[in-house]
Image (tube, grey):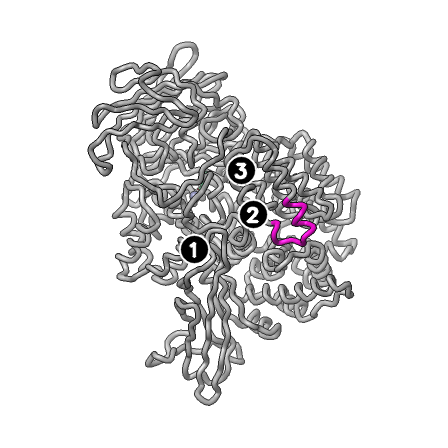
Amino acid sequence: MRTEQPQMIYLKDYQAPEYLIDETHLTFELFEDHTLVHAQLVMRRNPARGAGLPALELDGQQLELLSVKLDDADLVPGDYQLTDSHLVLQPTTAQFVVDTSVKIHPESNTALEGLYKSGGMFCTQCEAEGFRKITYYLDRPDVMSTFTTTVVAEQHRYPILLSNGNPIASGPDEDGRHWATWEDPFMKPAYLFALVAGDLWCVEDTFTTMTDRTVALRIYVEPENIDKCQHAMNSLKKSMRWDEEVYGREYDLDIFMIVAVNDFNMGAMENKGLNIFNSSCVLARAETATDAAHQRVEAVVAHEYFHNWSGNRVTCRDWFQLSLKEGFTVFRDSEFSADMNSRTVKRIEDVAFLRTHQFAEDAGPMAHAVRPDSFIEISNFYTLTVYEKGSEVVRMIHTLLGAEGFRKGSDLYFERHDGQAVTCDDFIKAMEDANGVDLTQFKRWYSQAGTPRLAVSEQYDAVLKTYSLTFAQSCPATPDKVEKLPFVIPVELGLLNAQGAEIPLQLADEAAASGTTRVLSVTESEQTFTFVGVAEKPLPSLLRGFSAPVKLSFAYSRDQLMFLMQHDTDGFNRWEAGQQLSVQVLQELIGQHQRGEPLVMDQRLVEALRSVLGNQQLDQAMVAEMLSLPGEAYLTEISEVADVEAIHAAREFTRKQLADSLFDGLWTRYQANREISRVTPYVAAAEHFARRSLQNIALSYLMLSGQPQVLAATLEQFEHSDNMTERLTALAVLVNSPFAEDKAKALASFAEHFKDNPLVMDQWFSVQAASGLPGGLQRVRELMQHPAFNIKNPNKVRALVGAFAGQNLINFHAADGSGYRFLADLVIELNGFNPQIASRQLAPLTRWRKYDSARQALMKAELERIRNSGELSSDVFEVVSKSLA
Ligand code: B3K
Ligand code: ZN
């Protein structure tokens, strides 16, 4: 907790460190009521900063200093200065050794940053600035050191003692204690430090690298979870192979470890050689984890593993460069997932997520560039913009350079910067140098916030046989900047003739036609491209694969969208056409609701989806995606002023219409797929994910019909499934149904069966918290009293409160403001013990500008109440003050 107003930190103020740390030697003595940390830092003046010897300012927070030595001299209080955040010493030589001993209290660390306890085990989370809560240090990513770490703890309670690197020695100690020493030879910043001590079991395997080295692989979990590690292990081995094949990157240490912990602020952490994971991102087996959870485990294991190169071997110079490692690594993991599963479906999921959530962030008070210019609390900048939009920026480079050019660029980047802490500019420079291109204008994606709009218009000249597309780009003002310069926007496109065939493309300045799909680079505010030799007026398929993170508009008629849904060769755009058609239909219904008219739905949507449903050639996951209507959160994002009730009513009405009109088709496909589930054991693979996703979306529609055979089928699926995907869907369908008795019975039996599995109970909470039936807030309040709920556990808060405020819009935005009051109370409480989680949960309130004036007033009042609630963490302070600015 701070005492003075938190300060803004600016990228423009960056300076290289005054001192460097070449070697770090740590000893941890772990006890139940305190921990002692002894640090020996082998340091020197940074030659890049000149010859003088300024004061050495070591970062440190919440540390009790026991002793400090400079070289061999014991220092006494007059020899150094100690503040809340620093230990300041005066070196007298250019090379020296600092020794400190501090006492810390992991056993009472509820912020889950630094060294803390999760259940019975010790673990760490140091990114971004948690290491300063462990010992005095230069806690910044451009200070890279080797580490040797010795952990001493009671043998019986903590038989397993882990840290980064390779194990070099271990042995017994006095009083039933023991010790282990680990050595990490790779230079790394302190944010990649990790320590684990606990009573853990592990699953072991090996991986043979491309140069024939054998790497030991271990996944450590609490004993009861030892049967839920195989999927993560398989994912790890696939990731290691993929990074060799696609990026030429080989693993470097002799051992790679993953540890699962239950109390974790985010998904996982890429500490060198010792990844620490939220158990939700490691544990998966058919009976307890859904298909989505299996895919998430695969993606997060890959993401953290890929950081070994994009993040660890080459790291960030400063935290403004966070997207250097995060955007790039998200791009890498999404390509990996695309290769392991269905590429088109992965793209659809990523884009739907980006457009719903990142676009909203980009339009809100916390909007910032992929490389922000300033921040108050860096923990607030692990955002969708830095991660997901950052990944889109890397994807655009990949699109512009092609796969081969991109690989040349990444090879040069890794080779040139191995062992260094660098910037986004260095990444771009490697791409430029390897390909002989100039990306100067492209770099605006890193510095300008906001989602660009791209308005496209067409002109066909039947006499000259030319077809022109005019692109007009603009970018709305964001809190940091009003005027924006034009971006480089890669637009991949094709042109379809009346038969739905793609026509060969020839631009006006080209000698001949070549290919049927193109990437145009739109670089000006307004720019026209003319195709020649176009025999008839074509229908354009624009922004294929969502080739740029922009809001594209083109005046498609509903018939044209239906045509694209059928004929576009780009799978993503087939889905996109369906989404645009749905949006048009839904917006019409929203208008009807607002005018108090009876709702009348355009039947073309029914017919379009009927033909999708009947298409046996189409990947079933695609069918499921196309049947999914745009969510309420997305409809909110694209509204000028979001009308909560009208959006909910229009969407529910459409779902019911589709359910009634398409009943037979849905029922046929449901039964066929459920039958396969009944006779084949669960497999976590793309075609089975696809089959179950269609089966499950079909079931959720079918239940809206209220037909008795659907209730019977749901109960059968709930009771007899061998896997969580089907069981949980059946439960969710019951929870959202009017069948109160069956619902209560199912909820009770599920909770009884899974009460000892916290990750399954999280899903039980979420399904109820997300239900849009009336009385949502009351249900959430009651669930907070359930014995399985624990406000100190971030997964529980996310499962219940996050699902309510983020997914249950009709209840959260109740007109009386009760949802807002509830969330504000919770944020105030969380602020007192876990600022990062408090600040995350606050996000829905920051979107107040999207709503009607009555709701705006209620939301702002709650933000003000938080602001005035007493001592705020810098995390919550930043979000609240920017939201109210
Ligand atoms: N690098 C970590 C995130 C750390 C968040 C710190 N508040 C996980 C990841 O992106 O892989
Ligand atoms: Zn990451």
Q: Is residue 836 left or right of residue 733?
A: left
Q: How far apart, in angstroms, are the residues tagged by discs 3 and 1?
A: 24 Å
Specify whether residue 660 is painted magenta: no
* Ligand 1 under 8 Å from disc 2 Cβ: no
Asked if the stretch drawn in magenta spans residue 850, the answer is yes
Helix, strand or loop under label 3: helix
User: Residue 505, position in %: x, y?
Assistant: 41, 77
The residue singled out by tag 3 in the image is 877
- As drawn, the label of residue 291 is 2
- Mark 1 is surrounded, within 10 Å at the Cα level, by few (under 14), some (14 to 19) or many (20 or more) other residues, namely many
> Based on the displayed image, in which of its 4 quarters is residue 820 positioned?
top right
User: What stretch of residues is rendered in magenta?
Assistant: 848-860
Q: Which label sits in the foreground, 1 or 2?
A: 1
Q: Residues within 10 Å of mark 3 (few under 14, many from 20)?
A: many
Looking at the picture, which amino acid does disc 3 mark? Phe
Q: Nearer the viewer, residue 509 or 738?
A: 509
In front: label 3 or label 2? 3
